[in-house]
Amino acid sequence: MIFDSLLGMFSVDMGIDLGTCNTLVCVKGEGVVLNEPSVVAVRRGTNQVLRNGNAVGLVAKEMLGKTPGSISAIRPLKDGVIADFDITEAMLGYFIHKVHGRSRLARPRVVIAVPSGITAVEKRAVYNSAERAGARRVYLVEEPMAAGIGAGLPIAEPTASMIVDIGGGTTEVAIMSLADIAVCNSIRVAGDELDAAIISYMRRKYEMMIGLQTAENVKIEIGTIADTDEELTIEVRGRDVIGGLPRRCSVTSGEIQEALQEPIGQIVECVTRTLECAEPELAADLVENGIYLAGGGALLRGLDQMLSEQTGLDVRVVDDPLSCVARGTSVYLENLTVWKDTMESDAEAY
């Protein structure tokens, strides 16, 4: 225990939003200090991470869809949970050591946000990966709680706060009150499904294959789910399905709106289902308090308008929705003695 405490003197405790698409790290008193894609480049057929250029995060994402036969660029998390244990461990270790300036004595306490619907086995995978990556104590907090705190919602008060957190792998919809979740639904339909819908649409309508990064860029640049006064257009490049040769075409925001109807419909259905399960008094609070959108999906044009029309409630996008969950983990970290009873831990804190 004495040795463990000594290691803590050389460490900076951190909060981590371990996302399917991006991992964000917060440090007490400094805010977000790292925001990199959750991507690792490995030698194909092995779990050996490439050492040249530290092929994790931003460097590895640039390799997606462009690697030669000897290299694979892998996203080790799928649908918000760990799909590849060893590579997640390597990625977390890289991020932890990067924040600490690569100090080998770094043994931080870590607060990690996880989807509310994950299983005990999936939680154990997060614990093990973080511990083997260098954490000396691991706390898990549910993403909706972290998002609510990061957004500054009064989740500890006796009033309903509702958050819709649309990440890369999961959408978390929760109504919170008195520092706990009253109603929650988690579906594995989020940013990745939106990208997949665009890829499918391009293949079906234009007989063109495009990559994940291209689909993501189309979503960011012209993605919309509501009619707009001005139609946006973007040039898309990919491979012709029939001829196999590279080509380009122009796509409009109206077409992307059509492509996104199905996955967005599933998210809207999840929101309405959650509202239907709320106690009458909580539902009454939401008439005044409204719904808050967080996560990268909150930036999709017209989503707040559509949800407002479907629910009859005010819908607002939180400030800086991309870092909302990470900021929440930082608040937990700064008030660990106050909040630790609301979190799951790999052991009792000391």
Image: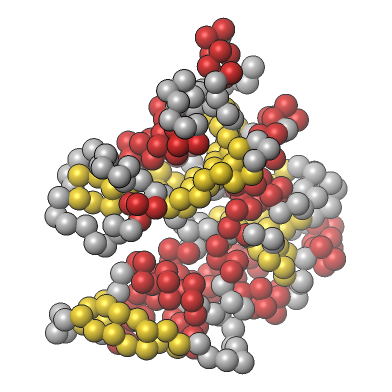
Q: Position of residue 225 (x, y in %)?
A: 56, 80
Residue sticking out furthest to the top: 2
Q: Is residue 205 above or below residue 68?
A: below
**Which quadrant holds the C terminus?**
top right
Q: Number of labelled discs?
A: 0
Q: Could you tell whether 205 is left or right of 29 in the image?
A: left
- Quarter of the image holding residue 213? bottom left
Q: Write the residue at 72% across / 26% down.
A: 337
Q: Nearer the viewer, residue 47 or 275?
A: 47
Q: Write the residue at 59% across / 83% down.
A: 226
Q: Position of residue 220 (x, y in %)?
A: 49, 72
Q: Could you tell whether 221 is left or right of 64 in the image?
A: right
- Quarter of the image holding residue 1? top right
Q: Is residue 196 above or below residue 141?
A: below
Q: Is residue 92 above or below residue 168?
A: above
Res. 288 visible in picture: yes
Q: Write the residue at 26% across / 39% down.
A: 51
Q: Could you tell whether 211 is left or right of 134 in the image?
A: left
Q: Position of residue 89 (x, y in %)?
A: 38, 35
Type of colouring: secondary structure
Q: Is residue 79 above or below residue 128?
A: below
- Quarter of the image holding residue 240? bottom left
Q: Position of residue 303 (x, y in %)?
A: 61, 74
Res. 144 visible in picture: no
